[in-house]
Image (cartoon, rainbow, N blue to C red):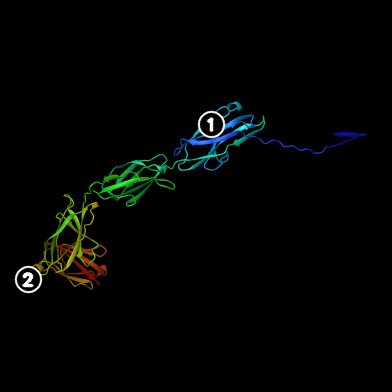
């Protein structure tokens, strides 16, 4: 109050009073349980029961996130249509969510934006609800099948379940169980390329989905057989004649088209040479110049360029003791001496009819080849070490091993 005293005005105040505005009553909203939940979708629901102090509701809908208590700043908003007024309460709303991630927990709640007055608006949220999308690995990939099976390769393909992108293949010889075979991981694809298979073998395979922290169960068994190899293993290795210094070894080819083989031959107490002896046309190997009463070993594989069969198991035999009637036969082989040598070796062909001589180093390099046997040969220029001498005569193949000091 203003009071005038003469020509001067003065202001007089009453004692102070206080008051409090009432708290804003937000709309009544409840998030309801989700439904139709799949690995990448769900339907969420909510109910609005009152307007509160809102004069009107301008926008309403849901906020959802993988973080608790989602808001506009950290969640995804989905608006819903429908008129809201005090006379329409309670009012239920629903919306369908898609493109969700499998195996995740989602939080959601109802929101409303309304006018408190003509110039002021406010945003309110309901309490939150949650749902969990199923893990994509809860289902097993299906339709596992084979395609383009060759001698050494095969392609497998399958149908994934929704949300599955990464897979594990387990394959091995027929009848294996998962965990015993070879594992192959396939990312972002539904085709597996298997390599290094063996021709004419039966295989089994399984597939399962790989998720972030889990796996699906294994699929049903797939069986397949690779194409037969054109270079099948030989069989039936046997000796048809054994003497004190020679032997005849025969075998059964892997198939009727085979006409070339590789033979590794040595005393049983020695290592195999690095370079094999080549046998063509007939499956017969006839080593000569052997030592009486000595154990020998050999193994054979077919050469079907560009393919090779597997090596056979070691075949062993022992030469017999020389008798008087064998002395003349002894002269049909070539004598190689001295052994060991300082570098120069001598050859005595005696009565042997030599067709070819080859000398190979321990590293597999051919250092000498001729259709005639020299009287002597200096190997010192090739360096010290072990050398393998293969002499082909009209009786067979004579193999010698010479040490050069």
Q: Quadrant of the N terminus?
A: top right
The residue beneath circle 2 is 324
Query: Residue at horizontal 35%, vertical 41%?
Result: 142
Residue 223 spot, x, y in % from top left? 28, 45
Q: Is residue 180 above or below residue 144?
A: below
Query: Residue at horizontal 23%, vertical 70%?
Result: 403
Q: Residue furthest right?
A: 6
Q: Earlier in the sequence, mark 2 or mark 1?
A: 1
Query: Residue at horizontal 54%, vertical 36%?
Result: 31
Q: Which mark is residue 93?
A: 1
Q: Residues within 10 Å of mark 2 (few under 14, many from 20)?
A: few
Instruction: Choose between 127 and 398: the one closer to the eye.
Output: 127
Q: Is residue 34 above or below residue 314?
A: above
Residue 63 spot, x, y in % from top left? 55, 37
Secondary structure at badge 2 equals helix
Quadrant in which residue 40 is drawn? top left
Q: Residues within 10 Å of mark 1 (few under 14, many from 20)?
A: some
Secondary structure at badge 1 equals strand
Quadrant in which residue 192 is drawn? top left
Count of number-bearing discs: 2
Q: Quadrant of the C terminus?
A: bottom left
377 to the left or right of 186: left
Query: Residue at horizontal 60%, vertical 26%?
Result: 87
Taking the image as drawn, is residue 334 in sight? yes
Residue 229 spot, x, y in % from top left? 23, 49
Q: Measure how far apart labels 2 and 1 are at the Cα level.
A: 112 Å
Residue 158 spot, x, y in % from top left? 34, 41
Taking the image as drawn, is residue 263 in sight? no
């Amino acid at each position: 109050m203003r009071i005038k005293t003469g020509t001067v005005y003065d202001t007089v105040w009453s004692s102070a009073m206080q008051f409090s505005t009432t708290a804003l009553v937000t709309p009544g909203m409840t998030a309801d349980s989700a439904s139709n939940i799949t690995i990448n979708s769900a339907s969420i629901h909510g109910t609005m029961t009152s307007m509160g102090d809102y004069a009107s509701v301008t926008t309403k809908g849901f906020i959802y996130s993988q973080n608790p208590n989602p808001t506009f700043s950290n969640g995804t908003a989905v608006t819903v249509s429908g008129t809201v007024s005090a006379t329409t309460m309670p009012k239920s709303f629903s919306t369908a969510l898609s493109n969700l991630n499998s195996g995740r927990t989602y939080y959601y709640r109802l929101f409303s934006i309304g006018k408190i007055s003509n110039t002021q608006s406010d945003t309110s949220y309901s309490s939150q609800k949650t749902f969990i999308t199923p893990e994509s690995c809860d289902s097993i990939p299906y339709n596992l099948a084979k395609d383009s099976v060759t001698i050494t390769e095969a392609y497998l393909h399958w149908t994934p379940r929704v949300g599955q992108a990464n897979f594990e293949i387990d394959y091995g010889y027929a009848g294996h169980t998962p965990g015993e075979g070879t594992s192959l991981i396939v990312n972002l694809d539904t085709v597996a390329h298997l390599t290094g298979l063996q021709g004419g073998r039966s295989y089994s395979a399984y597939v399962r989905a790989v998720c972030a922290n889990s796996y699906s169960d294994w699929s049903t068994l797939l069986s397949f057989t690779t194409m037969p190899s054109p270079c099948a293993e030989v069989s039936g290795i046997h000796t048809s004649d054994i003497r004190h210094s020679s032997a005849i070894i025969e075998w059964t080819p892997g198939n009727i088209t085979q006409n070339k083989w590789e033979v590794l031959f040595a005393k049983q107490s020695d290592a195999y040479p690095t370079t094999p002896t080549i046998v063509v046309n007939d499956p017969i190997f006839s080593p000569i110049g052997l030592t009486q009463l000595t154990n020998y070993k050999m193994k054979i594989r077919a050469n079907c360029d560009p393919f090779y069969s597997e090596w056979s198991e070691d075949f062993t035999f022992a030469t017999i003791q020389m008798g008087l009637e064998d002395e003349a036969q002894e002269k049909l082989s070539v004598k190689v001496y001295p052994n060991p040598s300082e570098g120069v070796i001598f050859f005595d062909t005696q009565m042997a009819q030599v067709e070819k001589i080859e000398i190979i180093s321990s590293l597999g390099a051919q250092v000498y080849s001729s259709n005639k046997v020299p009287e002597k040969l200096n190997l010192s220029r090739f360096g010290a070490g072990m050398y393998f001498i293969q002499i082909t005569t009209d009786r067979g193949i004579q193999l010698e091993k010479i040490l050069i000091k």
